[in-house]
Image (cartoon, rainbow, N blue to C red):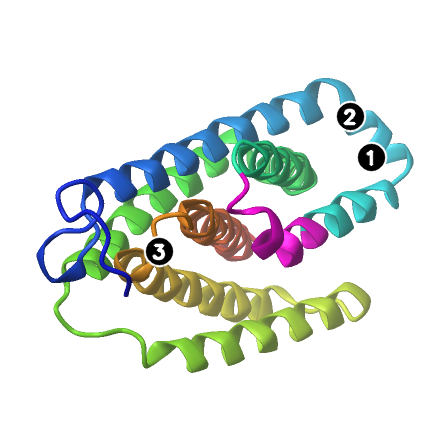
Amino acid sequence: MRQLHQETTFGRGGEITSTFFGKVMFAFALAILVSTLGVWLSFTYLIEIFVNTPSLIWIVFIAELALIFTSPMWSKNRPFNYVLFALFALLTGISITPLLLMATMTAGSGVVVKALLATVFMFMATGIIGWTTKRSLEGMRGFLFITLIGMVIIGVIGMFVPWGSGFEMIYSGIGVILFSAYTMYDFQKIKKYPEDRYIDAALGLYLDIFNLFIFILRLILSQRS
C-alpha cells in the first residue's frame, strides 16, 4: 500500500483514517438520498408508464449494469464520479419501485418498513463486525463471488420458470446471508483502498445495502405467501 501523508489519510501501519472513511460515507449517504429520490419520482411520475410498458424497466437495468461495469474508468475522475454515482443511485431507486409496489399492494406498506428497519440493523451489525475484526476476510472473496454468480444465474432462470414460495424463501435467505457477508468483507476492504478510490468503496457498500434490502423484503413476502 502506498504510504502517503500519515497525518491526513493513512494512520500508523497504513490503515486509512477518518479522512478517507469520511469520503466513503459521504458518497454512500449521497447515494441513499438520491435512490430515495428515485423511488419518489418513480411512484409519482413513472409507475404508470412501467405498468403500461413493462419492457422499459429493462432499459433501466441495462443502464445500471453499464455504470457498474464501467465504474473503474470513471470512479476516480472528480466531479464526474459523483455525477455518475448519483445517476446510478437514481436508477436503482427507480428500478426497485415495481417490487415496492407489489409489496405494498399484497402485504401493505408496513412490510416495507419492517424490511427497511431489518436492513439497517443488519447492515450496521455486519459492518461493525467487518470493520473491527482482526481476522482477515480476504479468503471469503472467491466463495462470495462464486455464490453471487450462482444467485444471478438462478435469478435469471426464475424470470422464465417461476418457483413456489418455499424455494423463494430459500433463495431469499441465501441472498440475505450472502450480502451480509459481503457487507463485512467490504467494510474491512475499505482499509485497503488507495486514497482516490473512495467512490469504488462507496459503490460496494451501496450495492450491499441495496441488495440486502431486496432479499430481506423478498424473504418477508415469501413467508406471507
Secondary structure under tag 2 reads helix
Q: Main secondary structure of the magenta part?
A: helix
Q: CA distance from mark 2 to mark 3?
A: 39 Å
Name the residue beneath numbered marker 3.
194
User: Residue drawn at (58%, 65%), measured in percent from left and top?
Assistant: 168
Of residues 177 and 110, the one drawn nearer to the viewer in this rendering: 177
- The amino acid at mark 3 is Pro
Q: Is residue 19 left or right of residue 171?
A: left
Taking the spot 61% from the left edge, 28% from the top edge, the residue there is 39
* SS class, disc 3: loop
Whichever of labels 2 and 3 marks the residue nearer the N terminus, that label is 2
| Residue 46 - label | 2
Q: Whole-Å distance between the Cαs marked 2 and 1?
A: 6 Å
In terms of image quadrants, where is residue 100? top right
Please state the horizontal and vertical placement of residue 106, each as a whole percent of the image: 63, 39
| Residue type indicated by callout 2 | Leu
Residues under numbered marks 2 and 1 in contact, where contact means CB atoms less than 8 Å apart: yes
Mark in front: 2 vs 3:
3
Where does residue 186 sit, x and y in percent of width and height?
35, 60
Q: Is residue 87 left or right of residue 192?
A: right
Q: Which quadrant of the figure contains the N terminus?
A: bottom left
